[in-house]
Image (cartoon, rainbow, N blue to C red):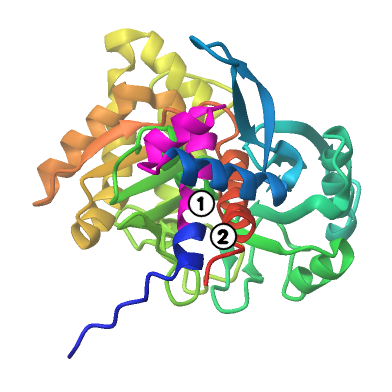
């Protein structure tokens, strides 16, 4: 079949050059016209015309001067931060955290509020988004996208929440209600998937196209990244490894009931605390129990060995199907277990399967879900704003 080539029209080439220049300004900071020309390979005249176009579109602004040799100082240009804003929201069973970032990615407003005293999810999100934008001194009309990270399943076809164990009031129809209320695009995404987005951007999975992230907290979840893209599955249930039918735990026959699923029973936070107690480590949380076991040195080894053995059942089951080169252990329990737990899981997976993925702890210690939500929102809005002349 003959290949189809898009014509290199002047308009398309200008748009591609403009986008390349904007990405450089975001990545490298303020640059002069000459520097943009050098980095893009454009002539001085073409680079000057490019900067003038971006100024006219309101996308870049002069931010200072760079002293040179002879002649006047060169003007420095940067992406205009207020061109657009995004809001990321991390929704949990007890609180909501929202952050507002400008188009450069700088977080300029952040709020959090309790969700315990309300049964109105639309009102909760509305207040969080409005307050975050207000903290950022941003008009709500400049907020081009809101991305919410939630536990549970998100339907890839509709974008709606279909099942959230910890958020019984969050349901189908909520997405449309939020879009109507906020008058801006709103997107739901699974919280573990967003943590994987953040890990790929600035954590342990930087530069890795294929990896899985195992979230170890109150529950257990898995995010799958293949060829640099999240894999959601046909119903959004890809990665719900808490429901793996593994040996050592009873298997509920109805997943919609409140009974804990098999792998969740075997390796969830309650199980980790129970293992620690059996070896004399009594702590308020599973994360604290692991930290205490690690601090105890060899005395805590049996705790880490048993927890790793249990976790390896789920990790191995996933890895023999996907065969990723990297597994990241995240969540409060994965973070607390650190390298000591990750190395044990890696050894155990290699011992019971034919695959040998590298297993490492997360490198993100603060709000990975929120960071991932902001990244997804920024990527979409930059495509809209920076790519508005393409086509």
**Mark 2: secondary structure:** loop
What secondary structure prevails in the magenta region? helix
Say whether residue 33 is magenta. Answer: yes
Q: Is residue 61 visible?
A: yes
| Highlighted range, magenta | 16-43
Query: Is residue 312 positioned above or below 173 on the image?
Result: above
Q: To which residue does mark 1 refer?
A: 19
Residue sitting farthest toward the front: 71
Give the crowd class for mark 1: few <14, some 14-19, many >=20 residues within 10 Å: many
Say whether residue 230 is magenta. Answer: no
Would residue 16 be found to the left or right of residue 228 on screen? Answer: right
- Image quarter where the N terminus lies is bottom left
Residue 120 point in image, percent of width and height: 89, 59
Q: To which residue does mark 2 refer?
A: 387
Counting residues from the start of the chain, the first of labels 1 and 2 encountered is 1
Q: Is residue 274 visible?
A: no
């Amino acid at each position: 079949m003959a290949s189809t080539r898009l014509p290199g029209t002047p308009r398309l080439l200008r748009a591609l050059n403009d986008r390349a220049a904007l990405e450089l300004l975001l990545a490298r900071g303020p640059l002069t016209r000459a520097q943009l020309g050098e980095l893009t390979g454009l002539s001085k005249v073409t680079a000057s015309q490019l900067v003038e176009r971006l100024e006219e579109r309101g996308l870049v602004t002069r931010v200072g001067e760079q002293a040179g040799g002879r002649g006047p100082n060169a003007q420095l240009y940067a992406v205009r931060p207020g061109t657009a804003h995004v809001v990321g929201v991390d929704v949990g069973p007890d609180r909501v955290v929202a952050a507002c970032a400008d188009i450069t990615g700088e977080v300029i407003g952040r709020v959090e509020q309790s969700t315990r005293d309300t049964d109105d999810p639309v009102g909760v999100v509305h207040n969080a988004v409005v307050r975050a934008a207000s903290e950022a001194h941003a008009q709500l009309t400049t907020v081009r996208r809101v991305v919410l990270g939630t536990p549970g399943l998100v339907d890839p076809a509709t974008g709606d929440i279909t099942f959230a164990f910890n958020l019984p009031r969050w349901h189908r129809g909520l997405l449309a209600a939020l879009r109507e209320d906020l008058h801006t695009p709103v997107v739901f995404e699974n919280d573990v998937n967003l943590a994987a987005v953040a890990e790929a951007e600035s954590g342990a999975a930087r530069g890795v196209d294929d990896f899985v992230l195992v979230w170890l907290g109150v529950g257990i979840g898995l995010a799958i990244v293949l060829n640099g893209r999240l894999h959601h599955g046909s119903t959004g249930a890809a990665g719900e490894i808490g429901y793996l039918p593994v040996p050592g735990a009873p298997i509920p026959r109805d997943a919609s009931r409140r009974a804990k699923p098999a792998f969740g029973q075997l390796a969830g936070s309650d199980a980790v605390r129970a293992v620690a107690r059996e070896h004399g480590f009594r702590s308020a949380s599973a994360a604290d129990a692991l930290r205490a076991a690690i601090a105890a040195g060899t005395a805590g080894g049996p705790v880490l060995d048993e927890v790793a053995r249990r976790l390896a059942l789920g990790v191995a089951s996933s890895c023999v199907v996907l065969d990723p080169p990297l597994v990241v252990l995240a969540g409060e329990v994965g973070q607390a277990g650190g390298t000591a737990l990750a190395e044990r899981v890696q050894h155990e997976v290699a011992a019971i399967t034919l695959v040998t993925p590298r297993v490492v702890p997360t490198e993100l210690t603060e709000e990975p879900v929120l960071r991932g939500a902001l990244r997804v929102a920024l990527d979409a809005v930059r495509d809209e704003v920076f790519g508005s002349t393409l086509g």
